[in-house]
């Protein structure tokens, strides 16, 4: 999912799903993990970085972890928490639909992806997008694996997709490297 596709999909989703998309796009966590996050688990004033916690009983790999909140997640999470506290004070969940637990969102997702020209895109595909973006941003593999909840390099590698843009970047870097070597010779 390119950034422009992400923005387009964001425009087509119902408002209650936008925060879930934003989190999935940035951190690549599984849908089930995200939908269990409670407001009390989000620390927007944490120093030096806002963060939230996933507990071991809420993760597929059985390991809890702390996830950084960054990018447009910061404003989206702040707004979501404010709205939840104001309008749904008895709701403990960060992600909800009018104070009710989100169990599934297949129909809304399918409609939005179709309208965005991304028919067939699964929420799970955001794991690939997040991993790709983390690695391209220079985040170490170990840290990226911790954020996304991958235990093994082999599974992580299956999600780290290479595309034509990666090949163009590689060619550009090699051209610059070869030019630098020619100047030194």
Image (cartoon, grey):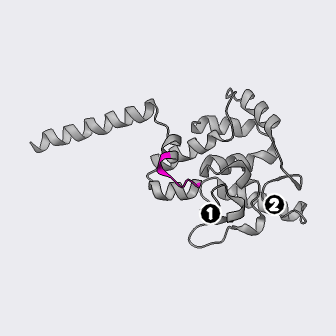
Q: Residue at point 47% right, 58% down?
A: 142
Q: Quadrant of residue 110?
A: top right
The location of residue 38, given as percent across then percent down, is 77, 63
Picture disc at residue 93: 2
The one nearer the camera, 24 or 13, is: 24
Q: Along the horizontal axis of the image, is 28 left or right of 106?
A: left
The location of residue 98, given as percent across then percent down, is 89, 52
Picture disc at residue 24: none
Q: Residue furthest bottom?
A: 47
Looking at the figure, which quarter contains the C terminus? top left
Determine whether label 2 and label 1 are within 8 Å by CB: no
Magenta span: predominant SS is: loop
Q: Quadrant of residue 2?
A: top right
Q: Residue at point 63% right, 72% down?
A: 46
Q: Along the horizontal axis of the image, is 89 left or right of 140?
A: right
The location of residue 171, given as percent across then percent down, is 32, 33
Q: Secondary structure at mark 1?
A: loop
Q: Residue under circle 1?
A: 63
Q: Is residue 173 visible?
A: yes
The location of residue 47, given as percent across then percent down, is 59, 73
Closer mark to the observer between disc 2 and disc 1: 1
Give the CA distance from mark 2 to mark 1.
20 Å
Question: What range is drawn magenta here?
Answer: 149-154
Choose the circle earlier in sequence order: 2 or 1.
1
Q: Is residue 92 above or below residue 131?
A: below
Q: Along the horizontal axis of the image, is 178 left or right of 105?
A: left
Q: Residue at point 73% right, 27% down?
A: 114
């Amino acid at each position: 999912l390119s950034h422009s596709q992400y923005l387009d999909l964001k425009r087509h989703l119902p408002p209650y799903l936008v925060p879930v998309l934003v989190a999935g796009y940035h951190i690549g966590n599984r849908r089930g993990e995200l939908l269990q996050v409670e407001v009390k688990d989000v620390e927007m004033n944490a120093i030096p970085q806002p963060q939230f916690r996933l507990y071991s009983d809420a993760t597929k790999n059985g390991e809890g972890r702390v996830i950084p909140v960054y990018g447009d997640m910061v404003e989206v999470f702040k707004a979501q928490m404010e709205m939840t506290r104001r309008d749904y004070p008895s709701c403990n969940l960060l992600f909800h639909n009018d104070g009710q637990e989100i169990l599934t969102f297949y129909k809304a997702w399918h409609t939005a992806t179709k309208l965005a020209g991304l028919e067939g895109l699964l929420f799970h595909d955001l794991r690939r997008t997040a991993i790709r973006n983390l690695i391209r941003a220079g985040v170490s593999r170990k840290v990226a694996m911790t954020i996304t909840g991958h235990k093994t390099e082999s599974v992580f590698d299956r999600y780290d997709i290479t595309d034509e843009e990666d090949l163009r970047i590689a060619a550009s870097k090699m051209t610059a490297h070869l030019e630098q070597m020619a100047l030194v010779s």
